[in-house]
Image (cartoon, rainbow, N blue to C red):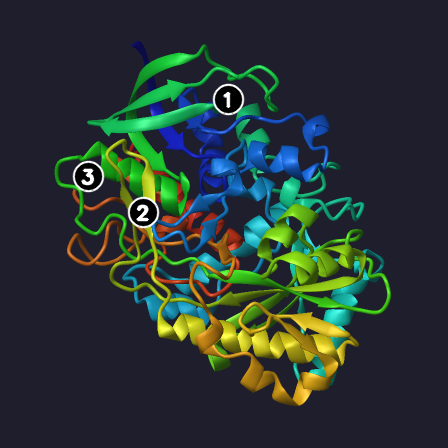
Amino acid sequence: MIEKAFDVVIVGSGAGGGTVAEELAGLARDGKKVLVLEKGPRFADSEFDGRELSMAPSLYAEEGGFLTAEGTMTLAFGSAYGGSTVVYTGTSMQPPERVIRSWGVPGLDFSDLDSRAKKYAGENGVHLLPPDLLNENNKLFVGGCDKAGYRAEQFPINVRGCKGSSLCNLGCPNGAKQGTHQVQLPTAERAGVEVVTRAEAVRIEERALIVQVQEKKPGAKGLPSEWAPGKYRIRAGTIVLAGSAIGTPALLLRSDLPGLPKRVGEGFTCHPAHILAAEHPHPITNDVGHPKSFFLDRSVEEGFLLETCMYFPFTTAKNLAGFGAPHSHLMHAFPRLQMILVLACDKAISGNRVTVDRAGKPVVHYRFTPEVITSLIRATRASARIFFAAGALRVHAPSADPPLLERSEIPDIDQRIEERHFKEGKISVSAAHLMGGCGMGTGPIDSVTDSFGRVHGIPWLRVADASLFPDSLEINPYLTIMALAGRVAGKLLEEKAWQ
């Protein structure tokens, strides 16, 4: 085993890890040794070719097919230099004050979180897209919302020089999306922070990490690791965990550290979602321009969000219910499909958690509550009305039986789309807003960390990712993760915790 030593080691390079790395850049300039470990590879810009069947397996954990233990939901999260900031659409929203205050975490000041999020929004070029980058899929959503009595809002997006390729979920081929791979990590590396890719943190020991560096397989995308393949023991003054709401709890659980708080893994939430599609009589420009520019927030009133979206043919086919001729017809109508992503605002409940199997691999247990199912049904009904108001001929709704609704059935939407048709395991549900598992709180009985990500009872160990959320955020978590990670790094510097 190869031995190395660093002052601070950060596990993960996404919104949390990349932010901590940037905030510790000054520490590196002063001669301290700061290391970032990333399980996924680093990609050259030229490798983002936009091909669904080659990019998805390269960019996503478990090739994008990570299933819950029940087999009823797919969880999507990136595994690359920059984490999930490489593969999400760039939607960047400020922390919602109502939700942050409802968490009731002692020492978590909303104004501090809000100002930090604004700082990172500025760094990463967050702004509203101009009209020429809004495709017809988005415009139909806005018009349909207006006619159906809703008010759509435009997403702020973190892009610079967007060329409207619509390939956000497969990695931007133009380097426009300003994730941590484009902003925070390069800044940190220029200051002397070391980043090692293809490096999996296997286990935590007392102020040390056991790490396996993988060799690049022949023909695989991505660059080779910066270190030689093999097993390493890395000693560290402080370890910061930012490996995602799945990766961080799993690493803690398989490490079995003395004194680890009992709630590790508890409180997992994820905004369960699925795709709805509607067929129009004419082609729709949903594969050019930015794919996700507008949303409808009904989280307070009805517990759901709607977002414009464009998914690629394989993903779309997987999400359409049914088989045979009806399924084939819809796929042949792909150029004429308007799409909406429906998301339920779930809550942290007992039993929804991250565990590990005998091999130490993460396992996510998730039960759909009646409230979540009701929210998805409400979202589907609202989407059907928006589709038809936008001029759709027919709507594909998985929670209807049969799943195709014709315009003549507009008066019957509530009767056609019902909870009894939501069959777990038969409707393709996915989630990408993975949260919880190391929630902040007052002490080891009710939480895993304090408001600065310090793990209760283990002063040299900190958490800086979405696993810190004690409950669902109800919106895209990107900027909130960065803001929390900035707090974690700031307290680490204040306390000189690496000593």
Residue drawn at the location 30% of the way across and 43% of the way down: 249
Residue 458, which numbered label? 3
Q: Secondary structure at mark 1?
A: loop
N-terminal label among 1 and 3: 1
Q: Using residue 250 as the reference point, say whether residue 423 is left or right of it.
A: right
| Distance (Cα) linking label 2 and label 3 | 11 Å
Name the residue type under label 1.
Gly
Kindly indicate whether the residue at mark 3 contacts the one at mark 1 (C-beta within 8 angstroms): no
Label 2: which residue?
A: 453
- Asked if one can make out residue 198 in the rendered structure from this viewpoint, the answer is yes
Name the residue type under label 2.
Gly
Label 1: which residue?
A: 192
- Asked if one can make out residue 293 in the rendered structure from this viewpoint, the answer is no
Q: In x, y percent, where is residue 498?
A: 30, 29
Q: In x, y percent, where is residue 78?
A: 52, 40
Name the residue type under label 3.
Ile
Compared with 191, 360 (above or below) is below
Q: In x, y percent, where is residue 110?
A: 42, 64
Q: Residue furthest left?
A: 258
In the rendered image, the quadrant that contains the C terminus is top left
| Distance (Cα) linking label 1 and label 3 | 27 Å
Count of marks, rendered view: 3
Few, some or many residues within 10 Å of mark 1 (<14, 14–19, 20+): many
Residue 207, which numbered label? none
Which of the two marks, 1 or 2, is nearer to us in this view? 2
Which of the two marks, 1 or 3, is nearer to us in this view? 3
Q: Nearer the viewer, residue 84 or 374?
A: 374
